Amino acid sequence: MAYSATLKKAIGDVRNALATAGIERQDVRFAEHGEHAPEPDAPTVLVACSGGRDSMALAAVSHTVCGMLGVRCGAVIVDHQLQAGSDEVAQNAAARCANLGLNPVVIRTVSVKGVGSGRSGEDAARQARYEAIIDTARDTGAEVVLLAHTRDDQAETVVMDVLTLSAGIDALAGMPSAFVRDGVRFLRPFLDMTRVQTTAICRELNLTWWDDPTNGDEVPVGQPLSQHYPLRSRVRHTLMPYLSDFFGADVSAHLSQAAVVAGEDRDFLDAATDDVYRQTVRLNTEGALVTMQVKPLAQAHPAIRRRTIARALAELQIPFASSHVLSIEELVTDWHGQGALSLPSGYSVNRRKHVIRVCKNG
């Protein structure tokens, strides 16, 4: 069949993403017409699939690309159990992936702890999802996991991070195209694709998909979603169209391009932080989960100092905002005997002489 320009772009984006992880064509025979089974020791690529249009498009495109490379392609579906009938949604997504030819197809059922409204509930679900995906990647021996975030998702993330985290350049940088979490490599090959394009791919390939009711798609455009909907859904449905209409331009395109530039700045700052982090931070020492030496922190540039503190908190997977980092920085730059600081999830920070300690309360 003749592929559309949109589908060709998607295939190229997935192939380029896999190449950055060192996954190339395994043998010249996979460049020939016809189907060729991958070798038993061929790499495995795992697609995280919710059954929605973005991830169904990614699953289909990834299966095609992996076939061209002689690579195995599987899928993992996470059932968060947050909606009635979620098990059926997961089973349907798994069946669609299997019909495309993905193998293995794994369903992981998780219990989301700390579910609430707003950003915290979404963060709790995200944490549970990543843990399930990482476990599946290890069980299947997957080289990489592909995530179906699009340019629209990127723009929404930038807006949400700026408004809720105020995390400086990190907020503007949005989601990285590649990252490693708990030893598992993740790639986002669709960050230059729009939701309109993934929908077009699904229609071109006659794929059906599931629309999450919490997205608010049934609410007419121009009518704001209520506070009962997740924050991302409200940003997507209400705020982004308003901003695009206000500026008379596609705001998602501008924000995602800004994220690319900010991401390069973030990478430079991260590299500059490495030396200070090595001099400063120790894990599981002196009865604390993390200790930080005050002297190298005090001598560092403020931008590097804050990144060092933030990286130390991230090592413990503590949810934090820039206000927490700034409060800890005051223990370095404005120390006058103040008491311990409270952090989310039952953690605290205190300074003893020339050492800052992050502890678990109790």
Image: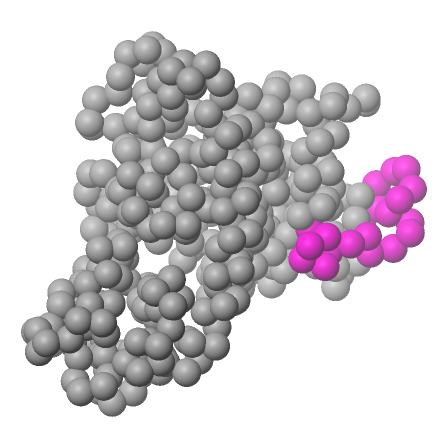
**Can the viewer see residue 215?**
no
Q: Residue 326, located in which quarter of the rendered image?
A: bottom left
Indicate left or right for 306 with 270 as reference. Answer: left
30 inside magenta stretch: yes
Task: Give the x, y percent position of residue 249.
Answer: 49, 18
- Displayed quadrant of residue 360: bottom left
Q: Please name whichever residue, 68 or 185, is drawn nearer the observer in this view of the structure.
A: 185
Query: What range of the chain is rendered magenta?
Result: 18-37
Residue in view at x 61 percent, y 48 percent: 74
Q: Quadrant of the C terminus?
A: bottom left
Q: Residue at x 72, y 59 (%)?
A: 22
Is 224 rendered above or below residue 270? above
In the rendered image, the residue lying farthest to the bottom is 286
Give how far across and how far down residue 322 sits, in percent: 27, 55
Q: How is the image coloured?
A: one colour
Q: Is residue 29 magenta?
A: yes
- At x 47% / y 33%, what residue is drawn? 255
Comparing 237 with 48, the one in front is: 237
Q: Position of residue 179 (x, y in %)?
A: 53, 57
Say if residue 173 shows up in the picture.
yes
Count of labels in the image: 0
